[in-house]
Amino acid sequence: MDTEIQGRAAHAADIRARAEAQMKAMGVDEAFVDRLVETFYGRVLAHPELGPVFDAKLSGRWPEHMATMKRFWSSIAFRSGAYGGKPVQAHTGVSDLTPGLFPQWLALFSETLDDIAPSAEAKVWFMATAERIARSLTLSLFYNPALDDPQRKPA
Ligand code: HEM
């Protein structure tokens, strides 16, 4: 039993070490994750369409949100397990969240990475990851089988 637990711990440590090496090779460290979150959400707040949707939910709670988002990105990049939240549930309570806002979120994230990413590879990695999560969130929040009927004629 002990050996099994030790084996799993060693495996997790190995995964973390590889993730860290991959990030390091792209110039990504914890300081960059902090800067990305600070810069991106600063721009989100100033965005005419995204800003009000975020602020309606997060007014008075922004510092907490920033800390959560740093843990979230750090957890994915470094496979640290630091984030244990439930993103889909968190978004079900966001009023006025529409599918059309996601391309705007992604465009702003892309512009932010153009400005501050430490390397082209880092931009590719963060964009691919954000796009995958955005797709998954969009499906979880908005997928409607009635609109997915192959027989259905386009309007
Ligand atoms: C237009 C698109 C989006 C909007 C308007 C939006 C809005 C929000 C808001 C208002 C919250 C705070 C919820 C709360 O604490 O009550 C939140 C949390 C969060 N969002 Fe988004 N979001 C969007 C897209 C995304 C995308 C693309 C990602 C990932 C790449 C993401 C990841 C998260 C995560 C991880 C949390 C924290 C969940 C938790 O509390 O554990 N969001 N979002």
Image (spheres, grey):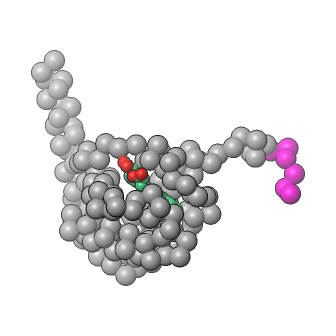
The secondary structure that dominates the magenta segment is: loop
Q: Quadrant of ligand 1?
A: bottom left
Answer yes or no: is residue 61 visible.
yes
Task: Give x and y (percent) for residue 27.
Answer: 24, 71
Which residues are drawn in magenta?
150-155
Q: Is residue 152 magenta?
A: yes
Q: Which residue is farthest bottom?
A: 115
Q: Nearer the viewer, residue 53 or 141?
A: 53
Q: Nearer the viewer, residue 143 or 150?
A: 143
Q: Image point 17% across, 30% down: which residue? A: 7
Count the numbered circles shown.
0
Q: Image point 84% across, 56% down: which residue? A: 154
Task: Give x and y (percent) for residue 20.
Answer: 21, 57
Q: Which residue is farthest front?
A: 60
Task: Give x and y (percent) for residue 9.
Answer: 17, 35
Task: Give x and y (percent) for residue 48.
Answer: 53, 76
Q: Quadrant of the N terminus?
A: top left
Q: Quadrant of the C terminus?
A: bottom right
Side of 86 where 33 appears, left or right? left
User: Is 46 drawn above or below residue 25 in the view shown?
Assistant: below
Q: Image point 27% across, 71% down: which residue? A: 35
Q: Nearer the viewer, residue 27 or 30?
A: 30
Residue 135: quarter of image: bottom right
Residue 31: quarter of image: bottom left
Answer yes or no: is residue 129 visible.
no
Q: Image point 22% across, 40% down: which residue? A: 12
